[in-house]
Image: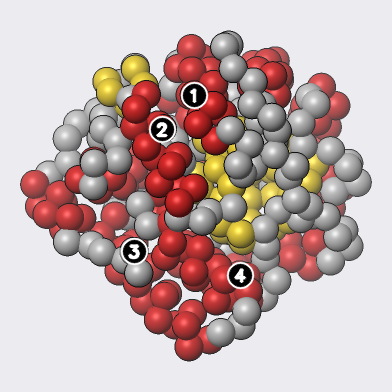
Amino acid sequence: MTYTTPQHSISRPLRGIVVPMVTPLRTPDALDVEGVERLVEHLVEGGVHGLFILGTTGEGPLLGHDLQRDLIDRTARAVAGRMPLLVGVTHTSLTESVRLAAYAAEAGADAVVLAPPCYFPMDQTELLRYVDSFAGAVTLPVVLYNMPALTKVTYEPTTVRRLMESDRIIGIRDSSGDMRYVHELMTLARGRADWCVLIGPETLTAEAVMFGAHGGVNGGANLYPKLLVHLYEAAAAADHQRVRELHDRVLQLGRAIYIPGRLGESIRNLKAALATRGICADAMTAPFDVPPTATTQDRLAALSFDR
């Protein structure tokens, strides 16, 4: 580690668009260093409210330990305290998650993000004990990450209610796509003024924010940060006409990028679009390190939502 940036004072509750940043790669196991710098500047200029690295969109669980740490260092250096930096530390090993959280803290991150460990089945009692152990071993605030499609474990509302008793845990990001669950989370959030509920799918962001969620962690914001920022602002202001206009654009963006049931291809499409705009290289790590089709590249190149 070669750089420590001054930490940004993370707001509570955290609000706005927190971008789940893609990991710019030159090869499947080497960073596109200049691409990291250009992407961070692109997002800063787009007015986003925070960055989240080493999540699903960032291929976090597939990256080697050295590459993860290199990304943390270089992103912290590029952000330089201009906005909150959240780092995904999910691992099948609690020890490794704690170690990565300690590294993120030393590098200058503002919070860590924790999904349930995958592979072994886990009940809610075990999950609660796991998160309590993690939160007690780290120094940074913790945001929970509910991603049951990949982890096969859900942070049930009763578990979230219990975890809200810890001041160190400051919110939850939900990518289940289940709005009934999101409404339960928002009901719980009324009991703690500094607790945030952030929504993953951008197609649900406006609806969730208008009902009380605090923002979105939206992959499409990598490409069009202003579009998602404006959508969030319109939803927070209950400007229904503006929300409808922007939501239509978000739907169009989603149709161009996301392939249902094919997460790797969806991330690859997002990177291909960023490469088309000269922001970063489009390499992916294994097993997704294959080029996008020419048809996909043409479709993505035709998108334009900056205004």
The answer to whether the residue labelled 4 contacts the one labelled 1, judged by CB atoms less than 8 Å apart, is no
Q: Position of residue 109 (x, y in %)?
A: 66, 30
The residue indicated by pointer 4 is: 208
Measure the alpha-carbon separation of dots 4 and 1. Answer: 33 Å
Ranked by sequence position, the earlier of labels 4 and 2 is: 2
Secondary element at tag 2: helix
The label shown at residue 74 is: 1
The residue indicated by pointer 2 is: 37
Dot 2: few (<14), some (14–19), or many (≥20) neighbours within 10 Å? some
Residue drawn at x 88%, y 42% is 167
Q: Disc 1 marks which amino acid?
A: Arg
The residue indicated by pointer 3 is: 306
The label shown at residue 221 is: none
Q: Is residue 269 visible?
A: no
Q: Nearer the viewer, mark 4 or mark 1?
A: 1
Ranked by sequence position, the earlier of labels 2 and 3 is: 2
Q: Disc 3 marks which amino acid?
A: Asp
Measure the alpha-carbon separation of dots 4 and 2. Answer: 31 Å
Measure the alpha-carbon separation of dots 2 and 3. Answer: 20 Å
23 left or right of 236 in image: left
Measure the alpha-carbon separation of dots 1 and 3. Answer: 26 Å
